[in-house]
Image (cartoon, helix red, strand yellow):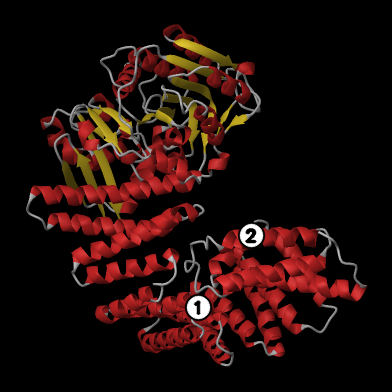
């Protein structure tokens, strides 16, 4: 890029213009969108172009080529305008938002330059951006200070749009604090300012933002003011709808109509709400906008459910789920938060539908549909965690679980937690059965968190109380069916706080036994992620890797050496220990020859952030991405990795996302089964348990789950290690056969 030589005054002007364009691109994204959930998808056509242009602009700006930077930013604005989609703009903003400190420096420098000139409009915009930055940094009081300065300057400059934006943003902060008396006058003033400006996209979206805030305040208002607020919200949405129609903006029109429908929904005027919501959907017929349309399909589903039209409500919810599915690979670790209410409400409708049926076949179909919907959410959450849509989607299996269960004496327990009740969908070899318990989500989480904390304390038996309670909730209701059907193995698909606990440690107060003393226990992050098949025992080869020495600030694990020696004596093994255990040598070993089992005995940590998840090697940290790349070297081999053993790893107490990462490690890495621990265990105890597990695998009559069960039962008989702190942490995840 060629720099243009300019006079000092021209340089100052171009720098100032560059800052103004930066401010425009930064501030508009939070001011024109109705609320934080209004736009979630990406414009697949515009986003890459905007991002490329923004990268060029920032490079030019940092190189001091201000005129070129101005030109690039102008191009970005043109692309944004031509696509008429705010989400393309938001995509470009990720570049700036990636470093808030850098953004602050840009704006502060811009203010220094602007201070030398009588430019209140530019200063107002920069202070608006400073306020937006403070909101991103969770500093609302600072944001209000900047917004007030911006408001004063915008009023001086006579810029009605800018004046409205500052008032809307201040009102948004006040509404979150429920300071309605402070927020309402600001919204009234913003509405008056917007009435003065010509019809535009900016005007439409700011009117929608005002309407949304009126609706939010109405939900917490007193009886004396709620009708006035409702009326004002409706009038504002109506004005936004008229503006959108005049400029032919289908997205703005859809938002205005849909939110008007939501107002009627809150007033239980369901038919009127339904009519407006259908109009909101119709406004989008000629464009692809799944990030908007799923909201209105969901709204239609809620309205039809309130009108007791469950079949049509279920169909509407399914359409909403389908629209969300189009967006699944476009979210950044927020999909579950957005999608969970829709999936849960659809699941609830399907369960209600099953209860209203008389014939067994349609009941089974409805229950299976409910379980399938929740499993889709689990798979999506795993994709969300690892930020991999395609890889995990390819690994979902079409194998019917019920077909496999028929021949394995296994029952699959699928807990579904609603706010005020717990549902258990249990797949037996011959049928799917539903159990309903009056257990709130808060009760379940409190009990599960208590059990997890107490299990790690080998000097107390206080874990018994929560272990008994969870047994009574999760196992007691199905006890008779388990016994009658001769079940030997329980497969759990836990969710939420249940991911953080080992089901093997649930305690039967009647039999005075742990669950593992009655059943082999296995878990899975999702039923569609299992490819059940028996472990091939012929020519089993193990890639044995471990650390015994203290490295990188971690303590030694002396018993790991014994563990590795014992496994090597049992199976044909390639050994990488201590200095030999590096990422490079592990990759070389696996590349040369296929292995049935990859065994890693080392310090490891599973974190809520997958980028902070690792297994310690001698000189580095092995990430799940590293492990995936190593295992994928053999993806075309006939023999897949049947078992990935992670000995001495741990997750944080109560960290559900970290536990999700542990549960999904096998899916991510490409292994059929994972044996891993929820918390760090005394390495002597762990070595004994793992060694026994491998010894049991020699018995062809035993499944992987039964091999672990026998190893844990042996540990229970050892007086030194019978406390569940020493054996319960080990989970078998995935294929149990």
**Where the N terminus falls, by quadrant?**
bottom right
Compared across the picture, whether 6 is left or right of 241 comes to right
Q: Quarter-wise, where is residue 703 in the image? A: top left
Query: Mark 1 or mark 2, which has the lower sequence index?
Result: 2
> Viewer-proximal residue, 690 or 351?
351
Residue 444 seen by the camera: no
Residue 405, percent across and down?
A: 21, 32
- State the residue at coordinates (38%, 83%): 222
Residue matched to label 2: 51
Left or right position of 429 against 673:
left
Please name whichever residue, 466 or 146, is drawn nearer the observer in this view of the structure: 146
The mark found on residue 182 in the picture is none
Residue neighbourhood size for the residue with mark 2, other residues' Cα within 10 Å, grouped as few (<14), some (14–19), many (≥20): many
Q: Of the residues tagged 1 and 2, which is closer to the observer?
A: 2
Q: Which element carries disc 1, helix, strand or loop?
A: helix
Numbered label attached to residue 209: 1
Residues under numbered marks 1 and 2 in contact, where contact means CB atoms less than 8 Å apart: no
Q: What is the spatial separation of the Cα atoms under label 1 and label 2, in whole angstroms? A: 26 Å
Place of residue 458 in the rendered image (x, y in percent of width and height, measured from the top left)? 41, 28
Q: Residue furthest top?
A: 569
The residue carrying pointer 1 sits among few (fewer than 14), some (14 to 19) or many (20 or more) residues within 10 Å by Cα, namely: many
Q: Which residue does the image show at 82% across and 77% down from the upper left?
A: 115
- Label 2: element kind: helix
Quadrant assignment, res 379: top left
Q: Quadrant of the C terminus?
A: top left
Q: Is residue 112 left or right of residue 398?
A: right
Q: Residue at x 62, y 24 (%)?
A: 584
Across and down, in percent, residue 39 comes to 49, 67
Name the one closer to the observer, 606 or 381: 381
């Amino acid at each position: 890029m060629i720099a243009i030589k300019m006079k000092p005054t021209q340089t100052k002007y171009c720098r100032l213009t560059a800052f103004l364009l930066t401010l425009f691109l930064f501030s508009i994204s939070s001011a024109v969108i109705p609320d934080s959930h209004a736009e979630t998808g990406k414009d697949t056509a515009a986003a890459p172009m905007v991002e490329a242009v923004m990268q060029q602009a920032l490079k030019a700006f940092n190189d001091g080529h201000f005129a070129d930077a101005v030109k690039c930013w102008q191009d970005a604005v043109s692309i944004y305008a031509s696509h008429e989609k705010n989400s393309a703009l938001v995509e470009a903003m990720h570049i700036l938002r990636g470093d808030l400190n850098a953004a602050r420096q840009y704006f502060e420098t811009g203010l220094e330059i602007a201070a030398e000139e009588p430019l209140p409009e530019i200063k107002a915009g920069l202070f608006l951006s400073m306020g937006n930055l403070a909101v991103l940094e969770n500093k609302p009081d600072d944001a209000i200070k900047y917004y007030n300065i911006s408001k004063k300057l915008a009023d001086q400059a006579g810029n009605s749009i800018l004046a409205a934006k500052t008032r809307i943003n201040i009102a948004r902060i006040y509404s979150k604090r429920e300071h309605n008396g402070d927020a309402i006058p600001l919204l009234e003033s913003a509405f008056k300012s917007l009435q003065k400006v010509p019809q535009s996209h900016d005007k439409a979206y700011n009117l929608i933002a005002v309407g949304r805030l009126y609706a939010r305040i109405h939900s917490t208002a007193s009886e004396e003011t709620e009708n006035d607020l409702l009326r004002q919200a409706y009038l504002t949405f109506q004005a936004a709808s008229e503006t959108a129609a005049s400029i032919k903006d289908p997205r703005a029109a859809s938002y205005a109509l849909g939110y008007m429908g939501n107002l009627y929904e809150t007033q239980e005027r369901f038919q009127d709400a339904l009519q407006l919501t259908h109009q909101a959907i119709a406004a989008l017929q000629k464009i692809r906008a799944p990030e908007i349309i799923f909201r209105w399909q969901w709204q239609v589903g809620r309205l039809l459910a309130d009108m007791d039209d469950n079949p049509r409500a279920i169909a509407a919810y399914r359409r909403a789920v389908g629209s969300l599915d189009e967006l699944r690979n476009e979210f950044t670790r927020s999909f579950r938060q957005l999608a969970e209410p829709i999936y849960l409400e659809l699941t609830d409708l399907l369960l209600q539908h099953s209860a209203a049926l008389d014939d067994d076949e349609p009941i089974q179909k409805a229950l299976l549909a409910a379980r399938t919907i929740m499993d889709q959410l689990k798979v999506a959450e795993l994709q969300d965690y690892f930020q991999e849509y395609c890889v995990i989607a390819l690994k979902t299996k079409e194998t019917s679980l019920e077909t496999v269960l028929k021949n394995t004496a296994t029952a699959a327990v699928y807990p579904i937690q609603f706010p005020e009740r717990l549902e258990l969908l249990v797949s037996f070899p011959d049928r799917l059965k539903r159990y309903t318990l009056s257990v709130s989500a808060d009760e379940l989480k409190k009990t599960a968190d208590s059990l997890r904390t107490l299990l790690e304390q080998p000097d107390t038996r206080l874990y018994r109380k929560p272990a008994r309670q969870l047994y009574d909730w999760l196992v007691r209701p199905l006890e008779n069916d388990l016994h009658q059907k001769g079940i030997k193995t329980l497969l759990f698909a836990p969710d939420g706080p249940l991911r953080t606990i080992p089901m093997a440690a649930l305690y039967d107060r009647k039999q005075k036994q742990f669950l593992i003393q009655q059943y082999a226990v296995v878990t899975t992050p999702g039923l569609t992620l299992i490819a059940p098949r028996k472990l091939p025992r012929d020519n089993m080869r193990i890639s044995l890797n471990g650390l015994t020495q203290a490295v990188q600030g971690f303590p030694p694990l002396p018993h790991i050496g014994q563990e590795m020696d014992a496994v090597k004596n049992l199976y044909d093994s390639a050994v990488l220990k201590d200095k030999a255990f590096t990422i490079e040598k592990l990759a070389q070993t696996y590349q040369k020859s296929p292995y049935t089992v990859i065994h890693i005995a080392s310090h490891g940590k599973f974190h809520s952030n997958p980028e902070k998840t690792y297994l310690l090697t001698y000189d580095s940290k092995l990430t799940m991405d590293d492990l995936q790349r190593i295992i994928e070297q053999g993806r075309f081999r006939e023999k897949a990795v049947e078992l990935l053993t992670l000995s001495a790893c741990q997750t944080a107490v109560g960290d559900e996302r970290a536990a999700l990462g542990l549960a999904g490690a096998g899916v991510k890495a490409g292994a059929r089964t994972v044996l891993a621990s929820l918390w760090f265990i005394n390495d002597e105890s762990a070595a004994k348990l793992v060694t026994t597990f491998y010894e049991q695998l020699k018995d062809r009559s035993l499944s992987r789950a039964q091999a672990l069960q026998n190893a844990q039962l042996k540990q229970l008989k050892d007086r030194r290690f019978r406390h569940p702190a020493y054996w319960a942490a080990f989970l078998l995840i995935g294929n149990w056969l």
